Amino acid sequence: MALDIQPLTALIGAEVRDIDLADVSAEEFDELQKAWMDWKVLFFRDQHITTEEHIAFGRRFGDLEVHPFAVGESDHPEIVMIQSDDKTQYAASGWHSDVTWREEPSMGSILRGVRIPPAGGDTCFANAAAAYQRLSDGWKAKVDGLTAVHDFTTVFGGGLSDEDRAAKQKEFPPATHPVIRTHPVTGEKCVYTNRGFTHHVEGVDQIESNRIISHLEKAVMDPSVQCRFRWEVDSFAMWDNRCTQHYATDDFFPEMRRVERVTIIGDRPF
């Protein structure tokens, strides 16, 4: 039987109903793979599964990373715990794709709602391929073929000592990626810069670099290429980091929001 897939918009996001992520058949998995490529972000509700089953579902798509900076659990290092309140603000409230500072950034992420505030705390997702497609011909000509340097330091370096920061910079040196990457499965061209991790565009001066990054960010911020997900406990969101960006709203303080993520290792962008 075909999966029940309900699109949120015409461009991005679909909810998959009547499926158990702990018991996905081979046929269902093939359908999920296709739906993921079609809709770029998939949502699942009422998934009362264990942490081990969350990890196992992620591993069906590829090897999982252990994040070198984000908080995890000692028993499950693949799990990144993101907890935010008015005292500790870890919500990713800026448009980005996960770990673009890696030489081989994430293919995808699978996030679970654990503690959800009564109001607020949504996550917005943007179709980075549609953002590129809507650029003017002049801007496409400007950015096609450019490369940019990505660095973890702006986001994660501030909480490290000078010694630890230097050690991490040696372990994870700045990575160079295309400003517009090509999706390895669909062939779509996608905006692949973000203000948090993209340090500068190569081959232009800093003013022009900032202008390019800002213009591409505005393209991603266009509400017409986005969808928005209202979390519930044991809801899951699964997004393709190669062709989407996301933004976690911080409109729920002083309530707490806790989510847990596994991240699927990808390959070098081209």
Image: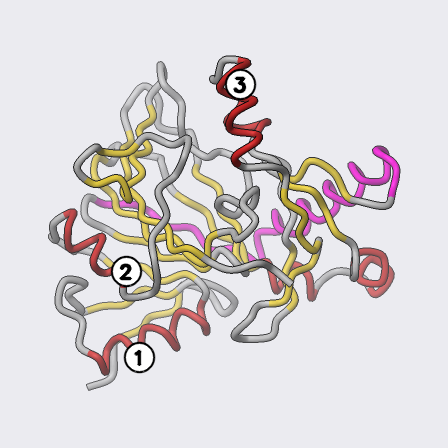
Q: Is residue 195 above or below residue 155?
A: below
The quadrant where residue 150 appears: top right
Which residue is pictured at 35% across the width and 28% down the height? 252
Q: What is the secondary structure assignment of the residue under circle 2?
A: helix
Which residue is pictured at 15% across the width and 50% down the height? 52
Q: Are marks 1 and 2 in contact (CB under 8 Å)?
A: no
* Real-space CA distance between mark 3 and mark 1, rounded to the nearest whole angstrom: 42 Å
The residue where tag 2 is placed is 59
Q: What is the secondary structure assignment of the residue under circle 3?
A: loop
Which numbered disc, 3 or 1, marks the residue closer to the eye?
Answer: 3
Chain part drawn in magenta: 204-232
Which numbered disc, 1 or 2, marks the residue closer to the eye?
Answer: 2
Which residue is pictured at 31% across the width and 48% down the height? 262
> Mark 3: which amino acid?
Gly
The crowding category of the residue bearing disc 1, from other C-alpha atoms within 10 Å (few below 14, some 14 to 19, many at least 20), is: few
> Mark 2: which amino acid?
Arg
Q: Position of residue 231 (x, y in %)?
A: 29, 45
The residue where tag 1 is placed is 30
The crowding category of the residue bearing disc 2, from other C-alpha atoms within 10 Å (few below 14, some 14 to 19, many at least 20), is: some
Q: Position of residue 116 (x, y in %)?
A: 24, 36
> Mark 1: which amino acid?
Asp
The residue where tag 3 is placed is 158
